[in-house]
Image: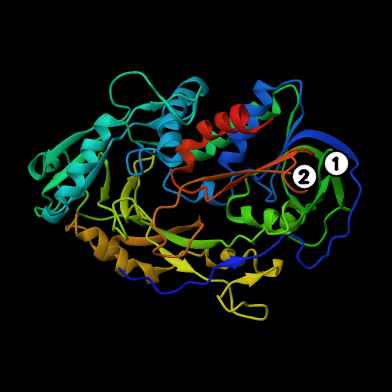
Amino acid sequence: MIQPTVRGLCAALNGSSKYAYVPPAFGVDYLVVGGGVVGLAIARSLALNRPDKTTYIVERHARLGEETSSRNSEVIHGGFYYPDDSYKTKFCLRGRKLLYEYCDTHSVPYKKTGKLVVGLEHQRPYLEDLFRKTQSLRFPNFGTFPASIEGEGSAVPARLLTGDEARELEPDLSPDIACALLSPETGIIDSHTYMESLERDVTESENGSVVCATTVTRVDAAEDGWVVQMKTTGSHGNEESEAEADAVMARTVINATGLSAPFILNSIGKTLSPSFSPINIWYARGSYASYHGPGVSNVKHLIYPVPEMEKNKHSFTSLGTHLTIDLGGNIKFGPDIEWIEPPAGEGWKADGSLVYDERAMDYWMDHLIASSKQIPSMYQSVRSYLPGIKEEGLQPDYVGIRPKLGPPNTGFQDFVFRKDYAAAGDKKTGGPMISLLGIESPGLTSSLAIGEYVERHLVD
């Protein structure tokens, strides 16, 4: 499927120079910017494993996990869709193992529902190849990450089923379904309870703190780290009733801001290197629909179609409009994918990107309202494998936004981990900044593994 050209957004924190420099009032060892599930997992790993150091996590919203972390399918993924040597595969495999263990020890609700990836006859080769891949995957050894493996046997238990075998498990599947891959280790999780538990781990640690309703407005390199300026919103929500700006000296900054991750880097790029090129970001909107009606009687598994490929078997932008079940037994379908663009206006470059205009940073928030306009296309997608559903049973539920590091047809996009230092040039001094870019699915499943990796291998 050929996608139209989509404009990317290239903006910088404090691009308009609204916020003047403020000297730091105090210092912290580790400042995690972004209180989503990945930022929380990183802060937890730092706070628990380095108790003699101060760890702060700041989140701009009044509550944690208000962006990508709370607007997804809440699925614990198996970890078999991506290239074997990719960060997404390694972190998903390790993260799934850690996450199930964490849920058991911290009373976080979850359920191993299992997942069926279902295909038509012409999709059989893809599913057969996917099954062969599951048999070869091993858990990564984080002692030498990302090089080696640990243990014997597959990290992804799976079975290749005929269409009839799949229908024995889920009788409502289409008679045209010719084969399916069963992943019994796939599950669902209460992501909000999980994030609340991570937050407690940080706040109950010796030197960990969580601060919400606090927005980073400016970052400056310093000899000993980074001067990070922030404003805290008052009790009136997003009104301009914030307190006077404060600044801290952070010896290490972890940029885990998800949808906003490039903006900090773009604001300090010339400090990092005269040849720094600003980083664009694209946003993919995914709609979810609740379902009440026939055609899904006694569904027990998550049901996914074969992803729609772009360039090769790994270059898909989403896993397709799939069926998921929440812990209350409610059925929903989604997400679909719809690329969104910044509003056109002054400041556009010839290639369609927008440079250094922070007014456009949060344009994606205007696309969070669930709409019925997506229902007909979602219905057509789902009925290809569940033909008994009725369009009138689908109701708009919620919308999530996924950060993308390239436009449609870019090909496979892995997680990106970038480490920069406050000192100019190639000198690795002055305090590191660790930036996480393109953290989308399977970010929730990978969160504890990412936290482990950042603390063990990236933080000095």
* Separation of marks 2 and 1 at Cα, in angstroms: 7 Å
Please name whichever residue, 27 or 328, is drawn nearer the observer in this view of the structure.
Answer: 27
Write the residue at 42% across / 61% down: 410
Tag 1: residue type?
Answer: Glu
Tag 2: residue type?
Answer: Ala
* Residue 140, picture quadrant: top left
User: Disc 1 marks which residue?
Assistant: 223
Q: Position of residue 71 (x, y in %)?
A: 49, 51
Please name whichever residue, 361 or 188, is drawn nearer the observer in this view of the structure.
Answer: 361
Q: Is there a contact, CB below 8 Å, between mark 2 and mark 1?
A: yes
Left or right placement of residue 340 versus residue 294 in this view: right
Write the residue at 46% across / 29% down: 99
* Residue 364, picture quadrant: bottom right
User: Disc 2 marks which residue?
Assistant: 422
Q: Position of residue 132 (x, y in %)?
A: 21, 36
Left or right placement of residue 244 versus residue 197 in this view: right
Q: Position of residue 383 (x, y in %)?
A: 21, 60
Q: Secondary structure at mark 2?
A: loop
